[in-house]
Image: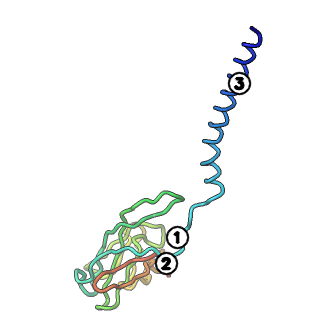
Amino acid sequence: MSDDISNRRAFYLKCIYGLGGLISGALAVPAAVYLLFPPKLHEEAQWVEATDLTRLPVKVPQEIAFHENRVDGWKVTSEKTTAWVVKMSDTDVVAFGPQCTHLGCAYHWDEQKKYFLCPCHTSAFSIDGRVLSGPAPRPLDRYAVKLEGTKLLLGPIHRV
């Protein structure tokens, strides 16, 4: 009888240790992958198709909305963002980031005064992004621009 109990007890201990080992392995494998294999960084510039150049008038700033992918670790999120695009000529296009360089407020194009205006602190920027007045410390940030036929592609944003 005691032999039967010890065999049963040994069987239950083996089951408990086996289940504990399976649970530990199930938790350890994802943790090891997370710690030993960091996500790959995108070192190459991500180009996003923003608009068709034939729809843009010359020397009239247009606010363009487009989607770009943002990578945060393993998570890729598609975000809607905007850019102010100025078609200087058929082969020369400038795209500005949508935030004022003072405190990051949204600015707009003042058609009557012919300059970009940040309504929060009255920073003014010329059509080429230079600071005309106000507390803004530097010109508007610019997107990298690439033209493929009539398509306007925007890359990463750069400080000027």
- Residue type, numbered disc 2: His
- Give the residue at mark 3: 13
Residue placed at 27% from the left, 82% from the top? 53
**How packed is label 2: few (under 14 Cα within 10 Å), some, or many (20 or more)?**
few
Foreground tag (3 vs 2): 3
Where's residue 97, x and y in %? 41, 74
- Residue type, numbered disc 1: His
Horizontal side, residue 152 vs residue 45: left or right:
left
Examine the rendered structure and indicate whether residue 132 appears above or below residue 121: below
Horizontal side, residue 40 vs residue 24: left or right:
left
Horizontal side, residue 30 vs residue 75: left or right:
right
Name the secondary structure under disc 3.
helix
Name the secondary structure under disc 1.
loop
- Residue type, numbered disc 3: Leu
Q: Distance between the residues labelled 2 and 1?
A: 17 Å
Dot 2 and dot 1 residues touching (CB under 8 Å): no
Residue placed at 46% from the left, 77% from the top? 141
**How packed is label 3: few (under 14 Cα within 10 Å), some, or many (20 or more)?**
few
Q: Which of marks 3 and 2 is nearer the N terminus?
A: 3
Horizontal side, residue 21 vs residue 117: left or right:
right
Q: How far apart are marks 3 and 2 (CA)?
A: 63 Å
Residue placed at 45% from the left, 64% from the top? 70
- Give the residue at mark 2: 158
- Give the residue at mark 1: 42
